[in-house]
Image (cartoon, rainbow, N blue to C red):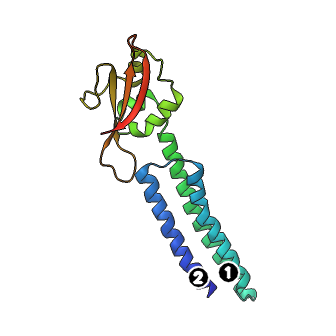
Amino acid sequence: MIPALLYSFVLLYALIYFIYIFFINFVHASISFMSIAALLLPFILLLFLQWISWKYTNTNKHNKRKLKIRFIVISSLGFALLVFCAALLGVNESESRFTTERWLNDDKARVYLVDDLINEHELIGMAKDEVFTLLGSPTETEYFKEEDNVVYYLGDERGIIRIDSEWLVIWFDGSDKAMKHELRTD
């Protein structure tokens, strides 16, 4: 009874991690407390169910060796899926680091760079020339365009359903200093 339950959970476990892999790639998820907790919870549950299976299965010398091998194989495969998902999160995290070169060369990936840009560079107070040096020329568009602002295309909006585009809008005061910025979707 318990081994059948364990094998069912192992299949469910693999399915959960394949869904995680799809989700991490699709929404470009990165390392956070929630993402790590979500990855660890099924693995901890897998180890717990294996421990219960070990404890409540009748064991003689032959069965004990068989159980030990099963435990090692299942744990190793489970751990490999966990490490793979964590590595994907790390890759996404590193790909989300802002550099002017990345910003200028891949305008569709800007949507993943913009958060790091806003966190690491104090845009408010920057001169218009400094903004252009950092971000390049603004996007030629009429979206959100006003007399005292510049607009940068970021790419398709983040999330599972990507219908709209995201934009970075930066407003300047009369002395051409950035006074406000905002992320918008069209």
Residue 163 screen position, x and y as percent: 30, 48
Q: Secondary structure at mark 2?
A: helix
- Quarter holding the C terminus is top left
Q: Is residue 121 left or right of residue 144?
A: right
- Local crowd at mark 1 within 10 Å, few (<14), some, or many (≥20)? some
Q: Is residue 1 left or right of residue 51?
A: left
Residue, disc 2: 5
Q: Is residue 151 above or below residue 67?
A: above
Give me the residue at 58% from left, 82% from top.
5
Give me the residue at 33% from left, 28% from top.
151
Residue 25 screen position, x and y as percent: 43, 53
Residue 53: give its label. 1
- Local crowd at mark 2 within 10 Å, few (<14), some, or many (≥20)? few
Residue 119: give its label. none
Q: Amino acid at mark 2?
A: Leu
Q: Is residue 48 above or below residue 154?
A: below
Along the viewing direction, whichever of 71 and 127 lies nearer the viewer: 127
**Res 46 → quadrant:** bottom right
Give me the residue at 51% from left, 69% from top.
14
Q: Are marks 1 and 2 in contact (CB under 8 Å)?
A: yes
Determine the CA span between mark 1 and mark 2: 9 Å
- Quarter holding the N terminus is bottom right
**Res 136 → quadrant:** top left
Q: Residue furthest left?
A: 142
Q: Amino acid at mark 1?
A: Ser
Mark toward the start of the polypeptide (1 vs 2): 2
